[in-house]
């Protein structure tokens, strides 16, 4: 039985698309069963709908606080019998209750070589520091922002004439390879999600 994956997005959803495409291949060990955006305008919802995957927005602005929003997310994910959650450009901070509920089953991808450049604008900060290498990281989610145990990374060079956009584009190619690789590894049992 393929591992049932849920993906949470906020925007264009290129990582979601990479996961959808990879896991649509024959005999994939995992499949995406539910996509949720916190923002009804998230372009990535269209990728899921085109792939025939149940997808909808749960708009955080319509809830009276984080706990009720998180509870609605959990209800939708549980309803779809999700076994692994991938945050893919999901721009809401999740509460401790949600993180505890899904501990060991909750992943994020971040465009830096964590623990370097947690949080916002990692590309610009890497460039302004003059580093020669950056990359992307898939990690387990804990209550520490971008601070959970690292599962896998891919590295890219940083060039002296890079802009945040050129570096982001170079890293994104690797994100699209790394995230499916990790989801497959977890589904096949060769990788695991540390509990933090
Ligand atoms: C990616 O760079 C991801 O690492 C970061 O947000 C961006 C999302 O891009 N967390 P996309 O929506 O998957 O295209």
Image (tube, rainbow, N blue to C red):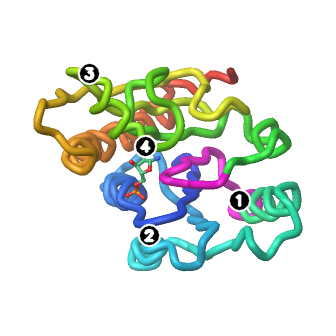
Of the numbered discs 3 and 1, the one sitting upstream in the chain is: 1
Cβ at disc 2 under 8 Å from ligand 1: yes
Of the numbered discs 2 and 4, the one sitting upstream in the chain is: 2
Q: Which mark is residue 44?
A: 2
Q: Secondary structure at mark 1?
A: helix
Q: Which mark is residue 131?
A: 3
Front residue (pair 118, 77):
118
Which residue position is annotated with label 1? 77
Q: Residues within 10 Å of mark 3 (few under 14, many from 20)?
A: few
- Cα–Cα gap, marks 4 and 3: 15 Å
Q: Secondary structure at mark 3?
A: loop
Of the numbered discs 2 and 3, the one sitting upstream in the chain is: 2
Residue extent of the magenta highlight:
77-92
Q: Secondary structure at mark 4?
A: loop
- Cα–Cα gap, marks 3 and 1: 39 Å
Q: Nearer the viewer, mark 2 or mark 1?
A: 2
CB contact under 8 Å: marks 1 and 4: no
Residue 162 picture quarter: top left
Question: In the figure, 96 relative to 61: above or below?
Answer: above
Of the numbered discs 2 and 1, the one sitting upstream in the chain is: 2
Q: Nearer the viewer, mark 2 or mark 4?
A: 4
Which residue position is annotated with label 4? 121
Residue 179: percent from left, percent from top = 39, 41
Q: Which mark is residue 90?
A: none
């Amino acid at each position: 039985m393929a591992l049932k994956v849920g993906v949470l997005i906020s925007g264009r959803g290129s990582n979601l698309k990479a996961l959808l495409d990879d896991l649509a291949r024959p005999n994939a060990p995992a499949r995406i069963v539910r996509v949720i955006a916190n923002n009804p305008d998230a372009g990535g919802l269209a990728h899921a709908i085109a792939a025939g995957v149940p997808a909808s927005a749960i708009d955080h602005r319509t809830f009276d606080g984080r706990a009720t929003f998180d509870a609605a997310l959990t209800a939708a994910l549980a309803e779809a019998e999700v076994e692994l959650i991938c945050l893919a450009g999901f721009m809401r901070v999740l509460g401790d209750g949600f993180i505890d509920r899904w501990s060991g089953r909750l992943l994020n991808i971040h465009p830096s070589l964590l623990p370097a450049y947690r949080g916002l604008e990692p590309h610009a900060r890497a460039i302004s520091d003059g580093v020669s290498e950056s990359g992307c990281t898939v990690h387990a989610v804990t209550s520490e922002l971008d601070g959970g145990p690292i599962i896998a990374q891919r590295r890219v060079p940083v060039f002296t004439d890079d802009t945040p956009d050129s570096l982001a584009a170079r890293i994104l190619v690797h994100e699209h390879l790394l995230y499916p690789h990790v989801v497959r590894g977890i589904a096949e049992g060769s990788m695991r999600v540390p509990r933090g």
